[in-house]
Each structure stands twice: as structure tokens, then as C-alpha cells.
Amino acid sequence: MAFERNVGGFDRLARLVVGSALLLVALLAVPASRWAVATGAALGSSGLLFNAVVGWCGLNALLGIDTCSQE
């Protein structure tokens, strides 16, 4: 199965910013022993940062959304 890029432009930038913010939340929640918050933020961050770096989103593929063609 070939993965074609379907995340681009503003969508990609927004995922990068929100993913980075969630990573910061996860890192700040660990010393405070807020394990549920840290785990949730880390999982969300990893998904968004993966989408931003690779340029592919499984949910976009399922829904037929392609923000790369808008560039």
C-alpha cells in the first residue's frame, strides 16, 4: 500500500504547532505526577507530529481529504 501525501500547507503547520504544544504539556505533566495528562498529551503529540513530518494522515485518507492539492 502506497501512502500519498494528503497533509500540506496550513494544515501541516497547524499540526506541527499543536503537536509541539502537546509535547510540552506532556513534558511538564511528568514532574507533577499527572500521568493521565502526560500520557494523553504524549499520544496526541506523537500522532500530530507524525502527520506533520510525514505529510500523511490516515483519517484524511479515509475521508478523502487532501490538503496538499491546495498548495
Image (cartoon, rainbow, N blue to C red):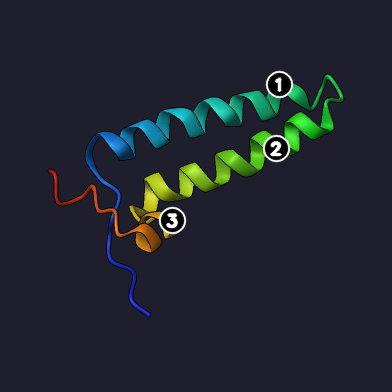
Q: Could you tell me which residue is drawn at 43 percent across and 56 percent down?
A: 59
* Mark seen at residue 40: 2
The image shows residue 47 at horizontal and vertical percentages of 53, 47
Label 1: how many Cα within 10 Å (few below 14, some 14–19, many 20+): some
- Quarter holding residue 24: top right
Q: Regarding mark 2 in the picture, which secondary structure is present there?
A: helix
Q: Could you tell me which residue is drawn at 64 percent across and 24 percent down?
A: 25
Q: Earlier in the sequence, mark 3 or mark 2?
A: 2
Please state which amino acid type lies under the numbered disc 2: Gly
Residue 38, relative to residue 51: is it above or below?
A: above
Q: Could you tell me which residue is drawn at 71 percent across and 21 percent down?
A: 28
Q: Earlier in the sequence, mark 1 or mark 2?
A: 1
Which one is closest to the eye, mark 3 or mark 1?
Answer: 3
- Quarter holding residue 34: top right
The image shows residue 35 at horizontal and vertical percentages of 83, 32
Residue 21, relative to residue 64: is it above or below?
A: above
Q: Could you tell me which residue is drawn at 28 percent across and 66 percent down?
A: 4
Q: Is residue 33 left or right of residue 69?
A: right
Q: As drawn, which residue projects farthest toward the right?
A: 33
- The answer to whether the residues at label 1 and label 2 have Cβ atoms under 8 Å apart is no
Please state which amino acid type lies under the numbered disc 3: Leu
Label 2: how many Cα within 10 Å (few below 14, some 14–19, many 20+): some
Q: Regarding mark 3 in the picture, which secondary structure is present there?
A: helix
Please state which amino acid type lies under the numbered disc 1: Leu
Residue that mark 1 sits on: 28
Residue that mark 3 sits on: 59
- How far is the residue under mark 1 from the one under mark 2? 13 Å
* Mark seen at residue 51: none
The image shows residue 52 at horizontal and vertical percentages of 38, 44
- How far is the residue under mark 3 from the one under mark 2? 19 Å
Q: Regarding mark 1 in the picture, which secondary structure is present there?
A: helix
